Amino acid sequence: MANIKSSKKAIKVIAKKTDANHEYKARVKNSIKNCEKAIEAKDVAAATEELKKVQKNIDKAVSKGVVKKNTADREKSRLNNKVKGMK
């Protein structure tokens, strides 16, 4: 355990940021899974709706610095191609 007051505060701040980052990552992963399920069920309307949610969540994660931009673009592109392939 830290002895210095600023170090103690830093530990608390890091814990909060870690929790927030975990929330963003979990939200992205869950929305991707939901979109994949809709694609496998061959439900075009649901897949399109889920794709919009995925893109929104990924963009938010990028703006917060949780996910790198190229990784986000790659994920969005792959899902977009899968949804377009359904039509």
Image (cartoon, rainbow, N blue to C red):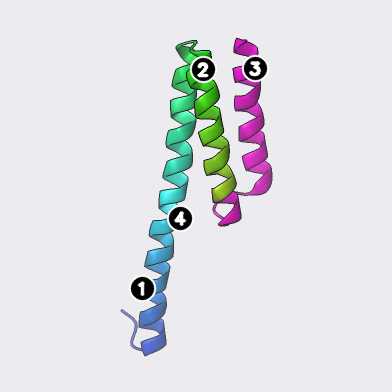
Mark 4 neighbour density, 10 Å: few (under 14) some (14–19) many (20 or more): some
Q: Report the residue marked by disc 1.
A: 12
Tag 2 or tag 3, which sits nearer the N-term?
Answer: 2
Residue 43 percent across, percent down from the top left: 48, 13
Residue 59 vs residue 70, the one in the foreground: 59
Q: Report the residue marked by disc 4.
A: 21
Q: Report the residue marked by disc 2.
A: 45
Three-letter residue code for mark 3: Lys
Picture layout, residue 72 above or below residue 18:
above
Asked if labels 2 and 3 touch by Cβ distance under 8 angstroms, the answer is no
Tag 2 or tag 4, which sits nearer the N-term?
Answer: 4
Tag 2 or tag 1, which sits nearer the N-term?
Answer: 1
Give how far apart the Cα atoms at labels 1 and 2 are: 43 Å
Tag 4 or tag 1, which sits nearer the N-term?
Answer: 1
Give how far apart the Cα atoms at labels 3 and 2 are: 12 Å
Considering the numbered disc 2 on the image, is that residue within a helix, a strand or a loop? helix
Tag 1 or tag 3, which sits nearer the N-term?
Answer: 1
Q: Nearer the viewer, mark 3 or mark 4?
A: 3
> Which segment did they paint magenta?
61-87
Per the image, is 28 magenta?
no
Residue lying at 45% horizontally and 28% vertically, measured from the top left:
33
Residue 85 vs residue 2, the one in the foreground: 85
Picture layout, residue 65 above or below residue 32:
below
Three-letter residue code for mark 1: Lys
Q: Nearer the viewer, mark 4 or mark 2?
A: 2
Give how far apart the Cα atoms at labels 4 and 2 are: 30 Å
Give how far apart the Cα atoms at labels 3 and 1 are: 45 Å
Mark 1 neighbour density, 10 Å: few (under 14) some (14–19) many (20 or more): few
